[in-house]
Amino acid sequence: MAVDLLLGLQWGDEGKGKIVDVLTQNYDIIARFQGGPNAGHTLEFDGIKHVLHTIPSGIFHENAVNVVGNGVVIDPVIFKRELDNLQQFNIDIKSRLLISRKAHLILPTHRLLDAASEASKGKAKIGSTLKGIGPTYMDKTGRNGIRVGDIEMKDWKKRYRALADKHEAMIDYYKAEIEYDLKELEAEFFEAVKVLKELTFIDSEEYLFQAQQAGKKILAEGAQGSLLDIDFGTYPYVTSSNTTAAGACTGLGVAPRQIGEVFGIFKAYTTRVGSGPFPTELFDDYGETMGRVGREFGATTGRPRRCGWLDLVALKYAVQVNGVTQLMMMKGDVLSGFDKLMVATAYKYKGETITHLPYNIEPENVEPIYTEMKGWSQDLTGMTKADELPEALNDYIAYLEGELNVPIKIVSVGPDRTQTIHR
Ligand code: IMP
């Protein structure tokens, strides 16, 4: 049985949480494979909005087991908060939420290091969510990290202390003016570790292998977006994990040949939160309207997201790197009332017209070349069937499908579970 993947194709915040929630009825297992609480996956149903950071978005469905894979980094403090928020829903967490022993832990000093590193960068800062993601993955690849499985061992606190002491020396090195009380942070951390220890730890690669053998349907849930991938994103303005399809193999221990459908999610326009190049960014009324109508604020940090037209050059690149087999277009409803829509189909780059994403997409190097399309005025938010969609939106969809050579199977017309049109 194949493992399907669901990934964001832009700079994150495409609406992965909502679509995983919609698709979970078709799956037995939902597995997160990378990232950590830098993510904010938003789900809405029955009039309630839920934001998940580390816990997979299938948690509200009784039919599904949720796995936090080895590629994920877990902050026990934030994890505990997420669990507290779930308490009112009577979910049997011990059987429905399984955690890989190989997932790495975010320590309080990782968060502090993130803050110190960012402060030291001044204008060149990444715009990190400051959740300690970069420093934790650095310790993972540097072979110094502490994993979930370690907290079951007797001597782990010794290793913790040595690592935290080293981090403190590194924080001093940055000479950043950050204030903190490590004792207090550690008390909170160890309290949260106790809660984490109550949960079910597994060897997730073995669990997922056996599940595949038994014919279970598995959906791997990505976090962030392809343009934030550590290798293929707009480096260094990226996150510290592989957000693209290959990350699901390493982040879960699933063999490449087991991958089935690759669902790629994109917004009908583009957003980015944090620093870094964004060729189609708008600084006019169109961008302001996208931000206001689309309520474009980070689910984790509350920061306003930068908005711009759809960038087909970047989207094609993401479709290609991920091997996307089905597309899902989010937030088409936000564009209702726009008199025109612009789509970047090429870049002017060093005097030439190119249609691939070059090494450097800083604004001084690339200028988007746009195709103008007709807008639509109809409110989409109450629509439930594909044949209700306005002609201009159908034209927009058909144009994108033609350019990307992949069918758009879902058009989302609002944040609620029910506002999802299947084509
Ligand atoms: P970090 O992963 O928190 O270090 O952040 C690195 C970059 O990725 C920053 O520009 C963040 O704004 C961005 N980023 C991280 N996680 C997300 C996400 O879930 N959605 C959108 N942007 C994100």
Image (cartoon, rainbow, N blue to C red):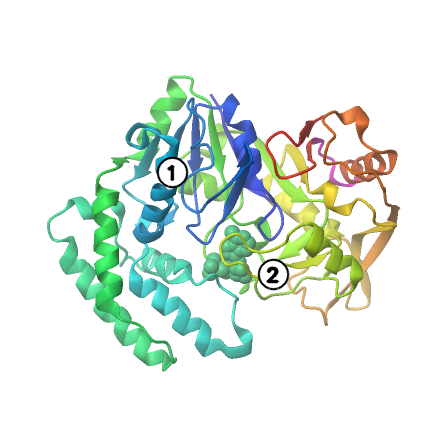
Q: Where is residue 359 in the image (x, y as percent from the top left)?
A: 64, 62
- Which image quarter is the C terminus in? top right
- Is label 2 within 8 A of ligand 1 (CB to nearest ligand atom)? no
Say above or below: 58 vs 195. above
Q: What residue type is labelled 2?
A: Pro
Residue located 51% across and 44% down the image: 41
Question: Mark 2: few, some, or many residues within 10 Å (few <14, many ≥20)?
Answer: some
Residue located 32% across and 28% down the image: 92
Q: What residue type is labelled 1?
A: Leu
Q: Which of marks 2 and 1 is in front?
A: 1
Instruction: Identify the mark at residue 86; answer none if there is no mark.
Output: 1
* Nearest the eye: 343 or 255: 343
Q: Residues in magenta?
A: 403-409
Report whether 33 appears left or right of 166.
right
**Residue farthest along the bottom direction in this orientation:** 175
Q: Which of marks 2 and 1 is nearer the N terminus?
A: 1
The answer, for residue 299, to whether it is visible in the render is yes
Instruction: Identify the mark at residue 316; answer none if there is no mark.
Output: none
Residue located 41% across and 45% down the image: 54
CA–CA distance in space, label 2 to label 1? 27 Å
The answer, for residue 70, to whether it is visible in the render is no
- Is label 1 within 8 A of ligand 1 (CB to nearest ligand atom)? no
**Quadrant of the rendered image containing residue 331:** top right
**Quadrant of the rendered image containing residue 123:** bottom right
Is 407 one of the magenta-colored residues? yes
Q: Position of residue 189 (x, y in %)?
A: 25, 56
**Label 2 sits on residue:** 304
Question: Mark 1: few, some, or many residues within 10 Å (few <14, many ≥20)?
Answer: some
Question: What SS does tag 2 mark?
Answer: loop
Q: Position of residue 90 (x, y in %)?
A: 35, 30
Report whether 45 appears left or right of 72.
right
